[in-house]
Image (cartoon, rainbow, N blue to C red):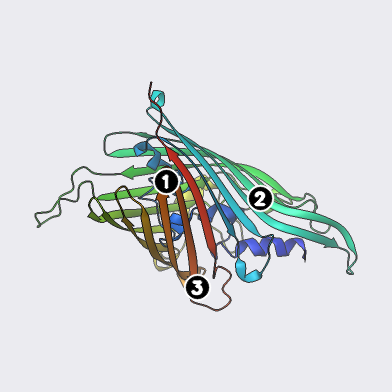
């Protein structure tokens, strides 16, 4: 059991956020081992059930059904066994809707805490946790272009009491939605070269966690959701019966505007002001990049190897690490794992292991 104060709970979460902090940053944690092993990139791939996080438009090009579960001990350098996160997702192709629907749950367990008096006397013991429940849908706008939407309920239980003499509690709830697009061109000629990238390259865009501020103590101190803009590509460099090799890259930015007094714009305003409120060079530094590669061997795909690199400017958070991973598919079952290798000793994200299990099957057609 850890002994902390309310502020300590919040600071433990901010370790996963950028310098521009937000409420419920756990919504930014990559859920699945596959994408986590590729530098936490996937907005233009999104070809499995985890599209609910990376880009719900990926559902527009998917068939069949899937149920998947992932788990990770979070911030392992803290050696806190009760700090962990679990994700669950279910997707189902619905022919009458010309698309695929999904349901997902994210649960972050923050552990058990003691509330103390001015001296070490324990007043009460409580548990901290957060969760989000998401429903999604993806369909095609054309043969090459898909669109996806998510809606989400968020609940944050940091502490069942207030802070000092202030009103309210460390408990809040809210809602958000996502919108994404995935472009998979059937034909894309390279200028000045006799080569067509059609069916080999994808482009993805996703704006997630769009919604009103969340307040714990009072509305005047409400914090914005981690509204995130993400764009990226996925390119198949090799595609054959037994060997498939893909590279991908993501570029993301938090759409949050905070002035010198700490006040933040509402999401409908921050969507625009976050691009010009700071000098152009500072805006560029706020972008987080992730690059990855995936190799599959087998017919059908049997064994996968993955690697990637994640980078954030030192003046905007400073997270940077290598990722590694692998996967096995057998019949309808999949198992994936990933590992983070940080460049700094005792980095909170260093040695993070994620494990994912999935079952995929074809939809029975009438």
The residue carrying mark 2 is: 130
Name the residue at 41% across, 26% down.
97
Furthest-top residue in this view: 366
Name the residue at 10% across, 57% down.
193
User: Which tag is nearer the camera, tag 3 or tag 1?
Assistant: 3
Marks 2 and 3, how far apart in space?
A: 26 Å
Disc nearer the start of the sequence (2/3): 2
The residue carrying mark 3 is: 342
Which image quarter is the C terminus in?
Answer: top left
Callout 1–callout 2 Cβ contact below 8 Å: no
Marks 3 and 1, how far apart in space?
A: 26 Å
Name the residue at 35% across, 48% down.
204
Give how far across and how far down residue 353 sits, in percent. Answer: 53, 63
Name the residue at 39% across, 65% down.
308
Number of residues whose C-alpha sits closer than 10 Å to that of mark 3, classed few (under 14), some (14–19) or many (20 or more): some
Pick the front one: 18 or 260: 18
**Can residue 253 be seen?**
no
Callout 2–callout 3 Cβ contact below 8 Å: no
Disc nearer the start of the sequence (1/2): 1
Quadrant of the rendered image containing residue 88: top right
Question: Is residue 89 placed above or below 256 in the rendered structure?
Answer: above
Q: Element under label 1? A: loop
Report the disc number at residue 55.
1
Q: Element under label 3? A: strand
């Amino acid at each position: 059991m850890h002994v902390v104060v309310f502020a300590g709970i919040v600071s433990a979460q901010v370790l996963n956020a950028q310098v521009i902090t937000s409420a419920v940053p756990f919504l930014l944690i990559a859920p699945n081992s596959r994408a986590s092993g590729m530098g936490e990139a996937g907005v233009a791939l999104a070809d499995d059930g985890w599209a609910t996080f990376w880009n719900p438009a990926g559902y527009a090009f998917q068939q069949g059904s899937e149920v998947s579960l992932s788990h990770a001990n979070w911030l392992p350098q803290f050696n806190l066994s009760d700090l962990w996160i679990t994700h669950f997702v279910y997707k189902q192709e619905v022919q009458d809707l010309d698309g695929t629907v999904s349901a997902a749950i994210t649960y972050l367990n923050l552990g058990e805490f003691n509330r103390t008096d001015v001296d070490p006397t324990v007043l009460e013991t409580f548990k901290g946790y957060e969760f989000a429940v998401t429903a999604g849908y993806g369909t095609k706008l054309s043969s090459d272009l898909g669109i996806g939407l998510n809606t989400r309920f968020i609940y944050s239980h940091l502490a069942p009491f207030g802070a000092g003499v202030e009103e309210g509690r460390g408990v809040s709830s809210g809602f958000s939605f996502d919108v994404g697009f995935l472009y998979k061109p059937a034909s894309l000629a390279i200028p000045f070269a006799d080569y067509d990238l059609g069916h080999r390259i994808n482009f993805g865009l996703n704006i997630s966690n769009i919604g009103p501020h969340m307040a714990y103590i009072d509305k005047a101190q409400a914090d914005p959701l981690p509204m995130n803009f993400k764009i990226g590509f996925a390119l198949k460099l090799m595609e054959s019966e037994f060997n498939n090799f893909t590279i991908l890259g993501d570029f993301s930015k938090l759409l949050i505007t905070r002035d010198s007094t700490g006040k933040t714009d509402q999401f409908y305003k921050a969507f625009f002001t976050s691009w010009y409120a700071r000098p152009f060079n500072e805006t560029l530094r706020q972008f987080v990049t992730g690059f990855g590669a995936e190799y599959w061997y087998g017919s059908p795909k049997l064994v996968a190897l993955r690697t990637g690199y994640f980078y954030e400017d030192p003046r905007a958070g400073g997270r940077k690490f290598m990722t590694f991973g692998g996967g096995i598919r057998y019949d309808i079952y999949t198992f994936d794992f990933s590992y983070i290798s940080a460049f700094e000793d005792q980095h909170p994200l260093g040695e993070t292991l994620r494990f994912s299990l999935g079952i995929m099957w074809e939809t029975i057609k009438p």
